Amino acid sequence: MAEAQGKLVVRNIGLILTGKIEQPIMEGDCVVSVGGRIAEAGYETNLDTAGADVVVDAKGVSLAPGLIDSHIHPVVGDYTPRQQQLHWIDSTLNGGVTTMISAGEVHMPGRPRDIIGLKAMAIAAQRWYENFRPSGVKVLAGAPVIEHGMEEKDFKDLADSGVKLLGEVGLGSVKDGPTARKMVGWARKYGIQSTIHTGGPSIPGSGLIDKDIVLEADTDVIGHINGGHSALPDDQIVCLCESCSRSLEIVHNGNERAALLTLNTARELEQLERIILGTDGPAGSGVQPLGILRMIAMLSALGNVPAEVAICFGTGNTARMRELDVGLIEPGYAADFVLMDQAQHAPGRNILDSIGQGNLPGVGMTIIDGVVRSRRSRNTPPAQMLPTIEGE
């Protein structure tokens, strides 16, 4: 993994998408990063672009924060035994995703369910993805699945060891509201974020988690509210949207109709900032390298949401809800970008109009911590224009 560049300038940007739902588009044509962090953004004539180590000529394409997948199930490195697939994280980078968040390393063969074992595996998973970033992608992992018998000290031990996430509540033996609420409270006390399985069972060992359990557990994220794969009845989904203020996570490996119901309910509540996106892969449906882009296009086209707002679902909304330093075009945030353009021969007046019609954009480059990590995507349709690195 390359070290962060001293100074990066991305110039000739046609459109800057901020990830901020309150202001998804900003005026400007240039972004400058120093030491892997955004220093300035705006018009090049007003910025300090001198002394750049790397200059990217965007050639008029759009720049957005690197996409965030809020719900994955990694195992080790860039390999998943669930689908016997190598390099799935690198493929996802080619879909514009630069940060991925584990909802539990549940596909690890022989996953331990005893307290000592599950703590050991969570700490190890946190370490191995901290020490090794496949293709530069930030994989936030080490998400233990809670089991009966855990005590407050166990959560303190996990937090003290660097664990910051819980795996999906409901994938282990804890499936009742009172126990889940107690353990989620312990996790929150020590700064560990939580998410919950929502809907019918997805894999052997999981079970039905209905609205009453979700509301009582009070996790930070309502995981795959549109089901992973089976969604709750409509009235329960609406109740979850109306009865709490937690994140509403919509996933690719879920029920599309329930996804649109969630989106429409959040819009009626004037709470679109709660919508975040994940793939819930690898799973039985496979790996979805373009899953976040597909969700953005689907929600924009069928949910009647402007494309620039839908992009916030997969960037800034997630960053804010999960308290991350990525996902926003803002000084001090990580210089993680995806440069993309309208796909060749795709209908639409421009990239936003094309996405709004349900079409995928073409990814031309990804940048993580101010370092170019991938060029023309091998997975998206080809973009009309591709950025270049000056001097090459």
Image (cartoon, rainbow, N blue to C red):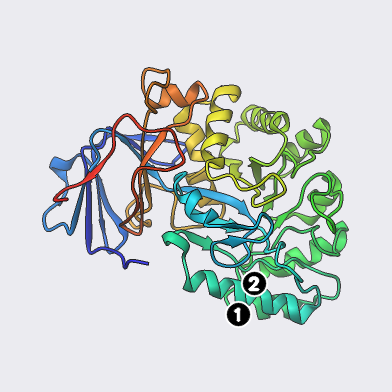
SS label for mark 1: helix
In-front residue for pair 282/61: 282
Quarter holding the N terminus is bottom left
Q: Residues within 10 Å of mark 1 (few under 14, many from 20)?
A: few
> Which x, y percent locates residue 244?
72, 44
Which residue in the protein does label 2 denote?
190
Q: Secondary structure at mark 2?
A: loop
Query: Is the residue 289 above or below the residue 23 in the image?
Result: below
Q: Nearer the viewer, mark 2 or mark 1?
A: 1
Which residue appears at 46% of the width and 58% of the height? 137
Q: Is residue 149 left or right of residue 194?
A: right
- The answer to which of marks 2 and 1 sits earlier in the sequence is 1
For the residues labelled 2 and 1, the Cα–Cα distance comes to 8 Å
Asked which quadrant contains residue 231, the reply is top right
Residue 365 location, x and y as percent?
A: 34, 45
Determine contact: label 2, label 1, CB under 8 Å. yes
Residue type at mark 1 is Asp
Q: Sort mark 2 into few (<14), some (14-19) or many (20+) by Cα contacts within 10 Å.
A: some
Instruction: Quickly name the residue at label 1.
Output: 160
Residue occupying the point 25% across, 33% down: 60
Q: Quadrant of residue 158?
A: bottom right
x, y (%) of residue 192?
64, 67
